[in-house]
Image: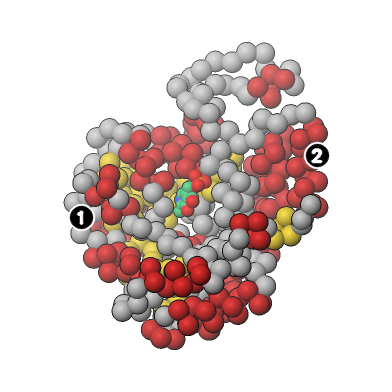
Amino acid sequence: MQRGSKASDVGWRVPLADLRIDEELLAAVRDTVGSGWWSAGPRVSEFEKEFSAYCGAGHALAVSSGTAALHLAVLALGCGPGDEVVLPSLNFVAAANVVAVAGARPVFCDVVGGADLNLSPADLEAAIGPATKALIVLHYGGNPCQMEAVLEIAARHRLPIIEDAAHAPGAVWHGRKCGTIGRVGCFSLFSNKNLPTGEGGVVVTDDQELADRIRLLRSHGMTSLTWDRHRGHAHSYDVREPGLNYRLDEIRAAIGLVELRRLEAENTARRRLVAGYRQRLEGVKGIAVAFPAVGDDVVSSAHLAPVLLPEQASRDDVQKRLGGEGIQTSVHYPPIHTFSHYRALTQRLLPQTDAIESRILTLPLFGHMTEAQFDFVADRVVAAI
Ligand SMILES: Cc1ncc(COP(=O)(O)O)c(C=O)c1O
């Protein structure tokens, strides 16, 4: 069996993201499979304990995906029909979808613009209206957004902040881990994330009441888990309110425990690579590397390496040329307000998002990228424009 990078399995010379597979990881999976208990149990509890300690959060609840984490946050905060939730359009569609599925209306705000792909606090505030029930903020690519301004706006309007921290495990804003700054933080453990388990997510909060509600909603509204009953810790259960099955399983939690212990090293390696892209590409042929200004006391988790192509370049052509050489690229993201379902619901103008959306290109990034892979990508990107 092959160990190490699995890029070769899918045919890219340099994939966008890549998993590192080694004996420690395989042993953790093997032990868990052999334990005879695969659904939520002791490894999930241990993962939650370690994740909350790592983030400095009062509570961490492991769930089945980042989307489930966002859905539970939106439901637990009581967002429903008649409510609006403000969020940046330049995000993965999950944040808007969970709001819509809960029966509320997503209202999109703009980004700062230029090479700053995070939300504009001024436009976030402009999007708040009498029906606004919550704000969902994204730390794009693991770069903390302007939380000082966001916290001030949220406090003034008495609105809870949900942090979509899918990209930001380990990112730090003024000594606080991203995801723990607002009322509730949502992480994704999808395969391409900095802390991958395949599928999975985590909700963090310091709010005991909210944590209790999310714990119930995560598992059918039931007051005990099958694991509790298996251990003889509970014999029956009550259902307090209708809920879902958004639990994480033991196998993924075992992977998560290994990956969590590797996260700091992974993030450090990623930051070094992003700095390398900046050194090699910034200003060359009109390329701008996103997030040029990292504020004092702010640390990115460097989940993505987005660049802005020069205005005259065709992104499609650049992607095709790079793809032809075995370099996988992507676009994070087609703005949500441009999708057919959301286009009809969108009333606000988002000029900064519209101005940059066709120029954003995400380059390959993963901690164990080799120097040869990095050099190849940097050279070929310049040649492709
Ligand atoms: C910013 C952002 N939010 C939410 C999600 C949803 O997470 P998941 O794929 O784990 O459901 C993702 C996942 O790709 C994401 O990138």
Q: Amino acid at mark 1?
A: Arg
Q: Is residue 372 visible?
A: yes
Q: Position of residue 11 (x, y in %)?
A: 61, 61
Label 1 near label 2: C-beta < 8 Å?
no
Mark found first going from the N terminus, 2 or 1: 2
The crowding category of the residue bearing disc 2, from other C-alpha atoms within 10 Å (few below 14, some 14 to 19, many at least 20), is few
The crowding category of the residue bearing disc 1, from other C-alpha atoms within 10 Å (few below 14, some 14 to 19, many at least 20), is some
Q: Nearer the viewer, residue 151 or 204?
A: 204
Q: Nearer the viewer, residue 77 or 349?
A: 349
- Between tags 2 and 1, which lies in front? 2
Q: Quadrant of the C terminus?
A: bottom left
**Relative to residue 83, is residue 209 drawn left or right?**
right
Q: Is residue 362 above or below residue 234?
A: below
Question: Which residue is found at the position 54% from the left and 82% from the top?
Answer: 379
**Relative to residue 210, is residue 129 drawn left or right?**
left
Question: Which residue is found at the position 45% from the left and 21% from the top?
Answer: 241
Gap between marks 2 and 1, in whole Å?
A: 52 Å
Question: Which residue is found at the position 21% from the left and 46% from the top?
Answer: 344
Label 1: state its secondary structure: loop
Label 2: state its secondary structure: helix
**Relative to residue 167, is residue 355 drawn left or right?**
left
In the orientation shown, which residue stands out farthest toward the front? 324
| Residue 348 tag number | 1
Q: Which residue is mark 2?
A: 31
Q: Position of residue 151 (x, y in %)?
A: 39, 56
Q: Amino acid at mark 2?
A: Asp
Q: Position of residue 48 (x, y in %)?
A: 64, 42
Q: Is residue 140 above or below residue 26?
A: below
| Residue 265 tag number | none
